[in-house]
Image (cartoon, rainbow, N blue to C red):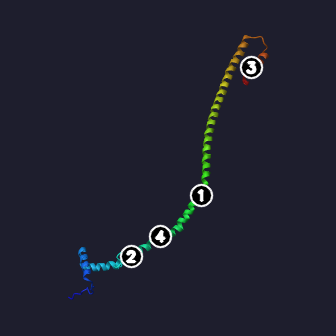
Amino acid sequence: MVRIDENKKSVRFPEAVDERLTLLARKLGRTKREVVMQMVDYFYKSKKDPADLNDEVLKKELSSGISRILSFIRKQEGDMLVPMYSAMEELMAIAKAQSPLLRNIGKGQSEATIMGRETSGYLKLVDGTLKKVLGNMRERETLKSRFRQILDYYITQREALGWPVSAAKKEELAKHARQSLDNL
């Protein structure tokens, strides 16, 4: 069987580079051939320039990415934040204009509360007075009733004693006394 050698290409480099490659291969625990192949794959996939030791290309890409992000933020600021700030300023102006009205409403409510308390106190006073008047009226009716009983007893007893006064005069006197009692 014929062995096909896949290693058809060779690279020539100075001995100083070979020494560094040997040290690197030992450090990584690989052969020089594997290290070279992996370096080629790495630079091919990452698209980095091996001569660019400080990653200047990467820095430029990052810088341009940051610039794009900043321009996007500025655009959003112009499209969204500026209108929101102006709307907030309008709302603040409206709030400042409305605050005296709200204070007046609060003041009116506190005055209404005070007036309600005063009215409640006045109504309690009126209620107490009406209860006293009602009690006095009941007492007055009781007194009238008792006085009528006394008067009726007096009239009956006077008639029983037989004073010599005419019946019409007696009746007129009793009627007048009863009427005076009712007028109390």
What's the residue at 57%, 62% (across, down)? Answer: 87
Relative vertical location of residue 65 with respect to residue 8 in this rendering, above or below:
above
Q: CA distance from mark 1 to mark 2?
A: 52 Å
- Please state which of the two labelled residues, at mark 1 or mark 2, is closer to the viewer: 2
Task: Judge left or right: residue 57 versus residue 38.
Answer: right
- Please state which of the two labelled residues, at mark 3 or mark 4, is closer to the viewer: 4
Q: CA distance from mark 3 to mark 2?
A: 131 Å
According to the picture, the residue beneath numbered tag 1 turns out to be 93
**Which of the two residues, 143 or 8, is positioned nearer the viewer here?**
8
Amino acid identity at mark 4: Leu
Q: Position of residue 94 (x, y in %)?
A: 60, 57
Q: CA distance from mark 1 to mark 3?
A: 84 Å
Say if mark 1 contacts mark 2, CB within 8 Å: no
- Residue furthest to the left: 1
Q: Earlier in the sequence, mark 2 or mark 4?
A: 2
Task: Judge left or right: residue 15 versus residue 57.
Answer: left
Can you say which quadrant of the picture contains the N terminus? Answer: bottom left
Q: Earlier in the sequence, mark 3 or mark 2?
A: 2
What's the residue at 28%, 80% (across, down)? Answer: 36
Q: Position of residue 183 (x, y in %)?
A: 73, 24
Say if mark 3 contacts mark 2, CB within 8 Å: no
Amino acid identity at mark 3: Ala
Can you say which quadrant of the picture contains the C terminus? Answer: top right
According to the picture, the residue beneath numbered tag 3 turns out to be 177
> Residue 56, which numbered label?
2
